Image (cartoon, rainbow, N blue to C red):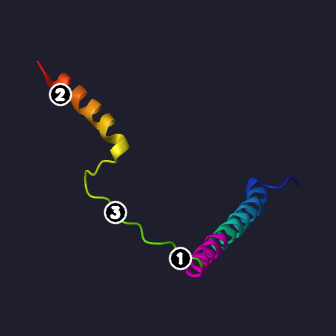
Amino acid sequence: MEPSLTDMLLPGLKLMITGMGIVFLFLALLVWIIGITARLVQSVNPQPEQTRRAGLAVEPDEAELVAVIAAALQRQRLP
């Protein structure tokens, strides 16, 4: 007697679900370990706080570039 379609699909479905579960657990464990490692590294070697620049502060080297962009925008807006 030939095995039915259900008899052939059920073991495959069980194997697929088992495999996907194992992969999911491995990835969850990996994310957890990376999170713990990141916190551990941050506590051992803290980074200094970065100061925020004022809203539109311009570096001296960028002043000419800002002037060129402003002139181009002004020229574009002229009728």
Q: Which residue is mark 1?
A: 46
Q: Secondary structure at mark 2?
A: helix
At which x and y percent is residue 30? 66, 70
Query: Between 51 and 4, which is closer to the camera in this rendering?
Result: 51
The residue sitting at 25% across, 50% down in the picture is: 56
Q: Which residue is mark 3?
A: 52
Instruction: Specify the quadrant of the image occupied by residue 79.
Output: top left
At which x and y percent is residue 66? 29, 37
The residue sitting at 27% across, 58% down in the picture is: 54
Magenta stretch secondary structure, dominant: helix
Disc with the residue nearer the chain's start (3 vs 2): 3
Residue 34 in magenta stretch = yes
Would you place residue 69 above or below residue 33 in this image? Answer: above
Residue 77 in magenta stretch = no
At which x and y percent is residue 63? 30, 40
The residue sitting at 63% across, 72% down in the picture is: 34
Residue 72: image tag: none
Query: Between 22 and 73, which is closer to the camera in this rendering?
Result: 73
| Amino acid beneath label 1 | Pro
Q: Which residues are magenta?
A: 30-44
Would you place residue 3 above or below residue 63 in this image? Answer: below
User: Marks 3 and 1, Cα distance to the nearest angstrom?
Assistant: 18 Å
Q: Which residue is mark 2?
A: 74
**Label 1 Cα crowd, 10 Å radius (few <14 / some 14-19 / many 20+):** few
**Residue sitting farthest toward the front:** 60
